[in-house]
Image (cartoon, grey):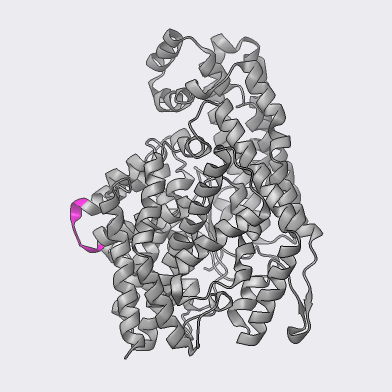
Amino acid sequence: MCNWDLSKMYKDKNAIEKDIKLVNENINKIDELKKNEKDNFVKILDLLFETDRVMDNLYTYASMKKDENSKVSDSVKLELELSSLYNKLQSRFSFVEPFVLSLKEDEQDKLIRENPSYEIFFKKILRFKEHTLSAEEENIISLMSEAMSSPHNDFYSLQNTDMEFPYVESIDEKLTNANFVPLLSKLPREQRKEVFEKYYDELAKYNNTFGSTLYANIKNLVILSKIKKYDSARQMELFNDDVEEVVYDNLIDIVHEYLPYMYKYYKARTKLLGLDEHHMYDVYVPSTKGFDREIPFEEAKKMVIEAVKPMGEEYQSIMKKAFEENWIDVYPKDGKKPGAYSWGSYDSYPYILLNYTNDVDSVFTLIHELGHSIHSYYSRANNEFKYAGYTIFVAEVASTCNEMLLLDYMIKNAKNDDEKLYLLDHHINSFKSTIFRQTMFAEFERETHKLVEEEKALTGEDFNEIYLNLNKKYFGDSVVSDDLIKYEWSRIPHFYTNFYVYKYATGLSSSSILSQKILSGNEQDLENYKNFLKDGNKNYPLVQLKNAGANIKDKEVLRTAFEVFKEKVLEFEKIVNK
């Protein structure tokens, strides 16, 4: 069967309506209990989590039904209604943190002592005590939050609504943000050069406005960090995950050390593509033609199960459940959501939505999403509801670790140099886009925020100069840093989600380290990794990764990931130069 079975969540409308009724009744009970919140606090908390668990199941089901076929109006309507109910319930959680932080120290100690199941939950709240202001001051900040988010909203409106990209006659197509990169990946060279120039010429017209918008975003964050008594904006953003700034800096330092191997890769690519010199508009062109054969889903199933053999029989058996118990909605269909994801609720299977198209990329997507789902499977099976959801910081570790295992399996079984070259390029490109590029963005954020914290005002031209210098550093002499690339920062939405992009890089670095340990066959390394999958959110991300065997705070441990990258580049270069 190639369709997921959501009837395991709700068999009919009556079951859905029963849970909706329960959520509404519990919200009313919570509101009644809150009339004396101090005496009823733990009762309220118990009821909140109990209700949130039911709501999680309802909303997840409705969303997946809509994604299954958005042309079914009942599914769309149900998702909208439950979205409103979900927000209504979440608003009831808003008093929890202020209440815990408002208690006297002896009251907080008593609360933890008498409610051991909430110890981790309460201690995570109390970490923020020295950065939490009075109730009145926090309310003022809350009221200002909409105004402080206006730079992000302005950026979105400018880039996606107000800007008019030109029509390109040579390709008979209008440029958009959505088609820009796909066009650069498939057009002949002269046409992609034209697309590149016309796209960035248009961005350049709005350089002052983009500069003003990004500066305002950074300035707002810097001001907020000072109000909240942090040493810097970066410290404030990393504090949520209990990540020290040295982790961020170590990542940038180690990437700098291995830039010469990225230069080697681009030089080999230049030769492989038959270019006189490599320009920025050539970056997205595939290095190789790719696999010239189809991989049916039945074959893909066998491949991914075999690829994770180093993870042991238990892991393989869980993966087999995904196929046997119909976790996966496999093929594209009319009305189905594009792309892929792993989802599900605490009480459901960790379902997977795919749009499988019988190619090698689909196989990698399959094993990637299975990594997420098996992580969720372990996490939910080993934690109560409130501790089962793992953080964004580690969310991509299990999925990309699976990809690394598949790459290793496929490279070892490659039929010829062309297949091997394609797979090596796939691996190197993962590093390039997820580690090197995101670290370049992270360095841009570090530099720009530091300047604003030093009371420097930044304009569009300042951002251009900083970005172009970084681009030259990260691509070296192996790629021509065309002058127009200095405007690229103004198309990156991630710069408005402050100090977030480095997590992509730390995630793939960690999975690279851990996959090498798993492939070595050491039983203790495998056990440590499985314990990581089982931890949910009980520990902070760096503790979880250290326990798993990837202490990324230690630069020498981090280096092992980059040594794998180095080996793959040298192997790629060797085949190209044959």
Could you tell whether 73 is left or right of 399 in the image?
right
When the figure is inspected, residue 190 is found, relative to residue 327, above or below; the finding is: below
Q: Position of residue 164 (x, y in %)?
A: 80, 66
- Residue 255 in sight in this render: yes
Q: What is the span of residues highlighted in magenta in the rendered image?
A: 519-524
Residue 459 versus residue 369: which sits nearer the camera?
459
Residue 464 versus residue 60: which sits nearer the camera?
464
Residue 450 versus residue 107: which sits nearer the camera?
450
Q: Quadrant of residue 38?
A: top right
Q: Where is residue 140 in the image (x, y as percent from the top left)?
A: 69, 23
Q: Tell whether position 520 is magenta.
A: yes
> Exactly how many numbered labels are in the figure?
0
When the figure is inspected, residue 96 is found, relative to residue 109, above or below; the finding is: below
Residue 534 versus residue 2: which sits nearer the camera?
534
Q: In which quarter of the image is residue 310?
A: bottom left
Residue at position x 34%, y 88% from top?
A: 577
- Residue 312 in sight in this render: no
Residue at position x 70%, y 54% from top?
A: 210
Could you tell whether 68 is left or right of 429 in the image?
right
Q: Where is residue 157 in the image (x, y as percent from the top left)?
A: 76, 53
Q: Where is residue 335 in the image (x, y as percent from the top left)?
A: 70, 65
When the figure is inspected, residue 217 is found, relative to residue 405, above or below; the finding is: above
Q: Quadrant of the C terminus?
A: bottom left
Residue at position x 43%, y 56% from top?
A: 505
